[in-house]
Amino acid sequence: MNMAREGTAQIMDEHKRIALVAHDNRKEALVEWCDENKHTLKRHFLLGTGTTAKLIAEATGLPVKGFKSGPLGGDQQIGARIAQGEIDMLIFFWDPLEAQPHDPDVKALLRIAVVYDIPVANNRATADFLISSQYMNNEYEHEVLDYNKVLEDRIKDFSK
Protein backbone atom coordinates (compact mmCIF):
# COMPACT_ATOMS: atom_id res chain seq x y z
CA MET A 1 0.00 0.00 0.00
CA ASN A 2 1.19 3.48 -0.87
CA MET A 3 0.01 5.74 1.92
CA ALA A 4 1.40 9.23 1.56
CA ARG A 5 1.90 10.79 4.96
CA GLU A 6 1.09 14.34 4.07
CA GLY A 7 0.28 16.68 6.88
CA THR A 8 -0.22 20.23 7.89
CA ALA A 9 2.21 22.18 10.04
CA GLN A 10 0.59 23.34 13.25
CA ILE A 11 2.09 25.77 15.73
CA MET A 12 1.28 25.60 19.42
CA ASP A 13 1.54 29.02 21.03
CA GLU A 14 3.84 29.54 24.00
CA HIS A 15 0.69 29.70 26.12
CA LYS A 16 -0.71 26.17 25.90
CA ARG A 17 -4.37 25.19 26.22
CA ILE A 18 -4.18 22.24 28.61
CA ALA A 19 -7.02 19.80 29.29
CA LEU A 20 -6.97 18.25 32.76
CA VAL A 21 -8.93 15.03 33.28
CA ALA A 22 -8.85 12.40 36.05
CA HIS A 23 -10.82 9.34 37.02
CA ASP A 24 -12.25 9.38 40.55
CA ASN A 25 -9.40 7.38 42.13
CA ARG A 26 -6.81 9.69 40.50
CA LYS A 27 -8.37 13.12 41.09
CA GLU A 28 -6.40 13.75 44.28
CA ALA A 29 -3.12 12.91 42.52
CA LEU A 30 -3.90 15.30 39.64
CA VAL A 31 -4.92 18.08 42.03
CA GLU A 32 -1.63 17.62 43.95
CA TRP A 33 0.36 17.66 40.68
CA CYS A 34 -1.38 20.86 39.57
CA ASP A 35 -0.77 22.50 42.93
CA GLU A 36 2.93 21.57 42.82
CA ASN A 37 3.19 22.96 39.27
CA LYS A 38 0.89 25.98 39.55
CA HIS A 39 3.81 28.37 38.96
CA THR A 40 4.13 26.91 35.43
CA LEU A 41 0.43 26.22 34.85
CA LYS A 42 -0.56 29.82 35.62
CA ARG A 43 1.01 30.87 32.27
CA HIS A 44 -1.39 28.61 30.38
CA PHE A 45 -5.14 28.23 29.76
CA LEU A 46 -6.58 25.32 31.74
CA LEU A 47 -9.70 23.30 30.96
CA GLY A 48 -11.08 20.25 32.68
CA THR A 49 -13.96 17.89 33.06
CA GLY A 50 -16.59 18.33 35.78
CA THR A 51 -15.44 17.81 39.32
CA THR A 52 -11.78 17.66 38.31
CA ALA A 53 -11.84 21.27 37.05
CA LYS A 54 -13.59 22.44 40.21
CA LEU A 55 -11.20 20.63 42.56
CA ILE A 56 -8.11 21.98 40.76
CA ALA A 57 -9.44 25.55 40.77
CA GLU A 58 -10.29 25.37 44.48
CA ALA A 59 -6.95 23.82 45.49
CA THR A 60 -4.67 25.98 43.34
CA GLY A 61 -6.52 29.24 42.83
CA LEU A 62 -5.94 28.83 39.09
CA PRO A 63 -8.81 29.48 36.69
CA VAL A 64 -9.98 26.24 35.08
CA LYS A 65 -12.77 26.25 32.48
CA GLY A 66 -15.05 23.38 33.41
CA PHE A 67 -16.97 21.08 31.12
CA LYS A 68 -19.41 18.29 31.94
CA SER A 69 -18.37 15.26 33.94
CA GLY A 70 -16.59 12.64 31.82
CA PRO A 71 -19.43 10.08 31.90
CA LEU A 72 -21.93 12.83 31.03
CA GLY A 73 -20.10 13.94 27.89
CA GLY A 74 -17.12 15.89 29.22
CA ASP A 75 -14.60 13.56 27.56
CA GLN A 76 -16.39 14.09 24.26
CA GLN A 77 -16.43 17.87 24.76
CA ILE A 78 -12.66 17.84 25.31
CA GLY A 79 -12.20 15.56 22.27
CA ALA A 80 -14.24 17.91 20.08
CA ARG A 81 -12.06 20.85 21.13
CA ILE A 82 -8.92 18.85 20.31
CA ALA A 83 -10.36 18.17 16.84
CA GLN A 84 -11.09 21.89 16.43
CA GLY A 85 -7.50 22.76 17.32
CA GLU A 86 -8.53 24.39 20.61
CA ILE A 87 -6.54 22.14 22.97
CA ASP A 88 -2.77 21.66 22.80
CA MET A 89 -2.12 19.12 25.54
CA LEU A 90 -3.99 16.49 27.54
CA ILE A 91 -3.08 15.54 31.10
CA PHE A 92 -5.32 12.57 31.92
CA PHE A 93 -4.64 10.70 35.13
CA TRP A 94 -6.66 7.56 34.52
CA ASP A 95 -7.22 4.58 36.77
CA PRO A 96 -5.92 1.47 34.99
CA LEU A 97 -7.28 -0.87 37.64
CA GLU A 98 -10.95 0.04 37.50
CA ALA A 99 -13.32 -0.36 34.57
CA GLN A 100 -15.14 2.87 33.80
CA PRO A 101 -18.73 2.99 32.53
CA HIS A 102 -17.58 5.46 29.88
CA ASP A 103 -14.49 3.50 28.69
CA PRO A 104 -15.51 3.94 25.01
CA ASP A 105 -15.48 7.72 25.51
CA VAL A 106 -12.05 7.54 27.16
CA LYS A 107 -10.70 5.47 24.28
CA ALA A 108 -12.17 7.94 21.77
CA LEU A 109 -10.57 10.87 23.62
CA LEU A 110 -7.15 9.22 23.60
CA ARG A 111 -7.52 8.30 19.93
CA ILE A 112 -8.43 11.85 18.92
CA ALA A 113 -5.42 13.17 20.85
CA VAL A 114 -3.18 10.89 18.78
CA VAL A 115 -4.91 11.82 15.50
CA TYR A 116 -4.25 15.51 16.17
CA ASP A 117 -0.73 14.86 17.49
CA ILE A 118 -1.03 16.56 20.86
CA PRO A 119 1.08 15.56 23.87
CA VAL A 120 -0.73 13.25 26.30
CA ALA A 121 0.26 12.29 29.84
CA ASN A 122 -1.59 9.43 31.50
CA ASN A 123 0.47 9.41 34.68
CA ARG A 124 2.52 11.68 36.91
CA ALA A 125 5.91 10.73 35.44
CA THR A 126 4.84 11.63 31.91
CA ALA A 127 3.15 14.82 33.14
CA ASP A 128 6.43 15.77 34.88
CA PHE A 129 8.35 15.20 31.64
CA LEU A 130 5.88 17.28 29.63
CA ILE A 131 5.77 20.22 32.01
CA SER A 132 9.57 20.34 32.22
CA SER A 133 10.00 20.15 28.43
CA GLN A 134 11.73 22.98 26.60
CA TYR A 135 8.54 23.30 24.55
CA MET A 136 6.24 23.93 27.51
CA ASN A 137 6.70 27.70 27.53
CA ASN A 138 7.75 28.16 23.92
CA GLU A 139 6.09 27.82 20.53
CA TYR A 140 6.15 24.30 19.15
CA GLU A 141 5.69 23.37 15.51
CA HIS A 142 4.47 19.89 14.70
CA GLU A 143 2.90 18.18 11.73
CA VAL A 144 -0.63 16.83 11.92
CA LEU A 145 -1.21 14.05 9.42
CA ASP A 146 -3.96 14.58 6.90
CA TYR A 147 -5.97 11.46 7.64
CA ASN A 148 -8.42 12.34 4.85
CA LYS A 149 -5.49 11.90 2.44
CA VAL A 150 -4.46 8.66 4.15
CA LEU A 151 -8.00 7.29 3.78
CA GLU A 152 -8.19 8.38 0.12
CA ASP A 153 -4.91 6.57 -0.55
CA ARG A 154 -6.18 3.43 1.18
CA ILE A 155 -9.33 3.46 -0.93
CA LYS A 156 -7.27 3.87 -4.13
CA ASP A 157 -4.96 0.99 -3.10
CA PHE A 158 -7.89 -1.32 -2.30
CA SER A 159 -9.56 -0.44 -5.61
CA LYS A 160 -6.60 -1.67 -7.63
Image (tube, rainbow, N blue to C red):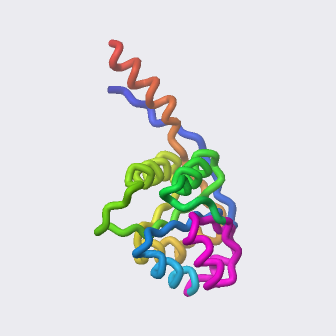
Q: Position of residue 134 (x, y in %)?
A: 56, 72
Q: Considering only vertical position in the picture, is 32 above or below 156? A: below
The residue positioned farthest toward the left in the image shown: 97
Q: Is residue 35 magenta?
A: no
- Tell me which corner region of the image, top left, top right, bottom left or bottom right, holds residue 125: bottom left
Please report the residue visible at 58 percent of the width from the left and 52 percent of the height from the top: 77
Q: How many marks?
A: 0
- Figure check: 97 above or below 59: above
Please state which of residues 133 and 158 is positioned toward the viewer in this rendering: 158
Identity of the residue furthest to the top in this view = 160
Q: Residue at x 60, y 55 (%)?
A: 141
Quarter of the figure with residue 54: bottom right
Magenta segment range?
36-65
Picture residue at 54% right of the left edge, 45% below the top: 144
Quarter of the C terminus within the rendering: top left
Whether residue 58 is in magenta: the answer is yes
Horizontal arrangement in the rendering, residue 44 relative to residue 68 (left or right) = right
**What residue lies at 53% left-to-right and 55% top-to-bottom?**
72
Residue 121 location (% of width, % of height): 45, 67
Above/below status of 133 relative to 78:
below
**In the figure, is residue 33 to the left or right of 101?**
right
Residue 12 drawn above or below residue 61: above
Quick one: quadrant of the N terminus?
top left
Quick one: 4 or 51, which is closer to the camera? 51
The location of residue 59, given as percent across then percent down, is 61, 85
